[in-house]
Image (cartoon, rainbow, N blue to C red):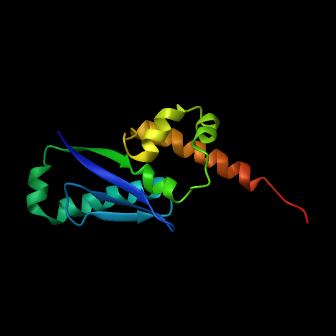
């Protein structure tokens, strides 16, 4: 079974993804799960419309998702990596390596990091400042 590498990045407005092995196979989404669903749909479309790709992956394929955490954290320079690691019960040294791009996070680690970011968002949303 062949592997398709899906790279997920973040910009100011949304998430976007592309498949390394399929030129032009891209998708966007407002959140991580949505972009994953959308890229899977685009892969299916690409394979159904391109007979050469269809033959290449006729025995099936597996998806390997890679999140470019550098792109996520460039948008969040205010986030203290050590504190986020503590909030998400993550290894701070390892998280720094993911953020710097020197190491790639697995999909499971990415989900844990996204959960930690969600926890931080929930904490921030619970704050109400009075004048």
Answer with the quarter of the image where residue 85 lies.
Answer: top right
Q: Nearer the viewer, residue 83 or 15?
A: 83
The residue sitting at 52% across, 38% down in the picture is 112
Q: Nearer the viewer, residue 95 or 4?
A: 95
**Residue 9 in the image: x percent, y percent?**
40, 57
Direction from residue 113 to residue 36 in the image, left or right = left
Answer with the quarter of the image where residue 103 lies.
Answer: top left
Above or below residue 117? Residue 131 is: below
Count of labels in the image: 0
**Residue 121 in the image: x percent, y percent?**
66, 52
The residue sitting at 39% across, 38% down in the picture is 106
Q: Nearer the viewer, residue 9 or 73?
A: 73
Direction from residue 15 to residue 44 in the image, left or right = left
**Residue 105 in the image: x percent, y percent?**
40, 40
Q: Nearer the viewer, residue 61 or 69?
A: 69
Above or below residue 99? Residue 23 is: below
Quadrant of the drawing holding the C terminus: bottom right
Direction from residue 76 to residue 68 in the image, left or right = left
Above or below residue 46? Residue 91 is: above
The residue sitting at 59% across, 42% down in the picture is 116
The residue sitting at 56% across, 56% down in the picture is 76
Quadrant of the drawing holding the N terminus: top left
In the rendered image, the residue lying farthest to the right is 131
**Residue 93 in the image: x percent, y percent?**
49, 33
């Amino acid at each position: 079974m062949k592997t398709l590498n899906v790279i997920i990045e973040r910009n100011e407005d949304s998430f976007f993804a592309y498949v390394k092995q399929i030129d032009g196979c891209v998708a966007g989404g407002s959140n991580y799960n949505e972009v994953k669903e959308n890229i899977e749909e685009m892969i299916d479309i690409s394979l159904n419309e391109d007979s050469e790709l269809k033959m290449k992956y006729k025995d099936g394929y597996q998806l390997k998702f890679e999140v470019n955490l550098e792109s996520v954290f460039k948008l969040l320079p205010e986030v203290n990596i050590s504190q986020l690691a503590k909030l998400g019960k993550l290894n701070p040294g390892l998280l720094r390596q993911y953020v710097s791009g020197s190491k790639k996070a697995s999909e499971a680690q990415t989900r844990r990091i996204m959960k930690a970011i969600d926890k931080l968002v929930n904490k921030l949303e619970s704050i109400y400042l009075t004048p």
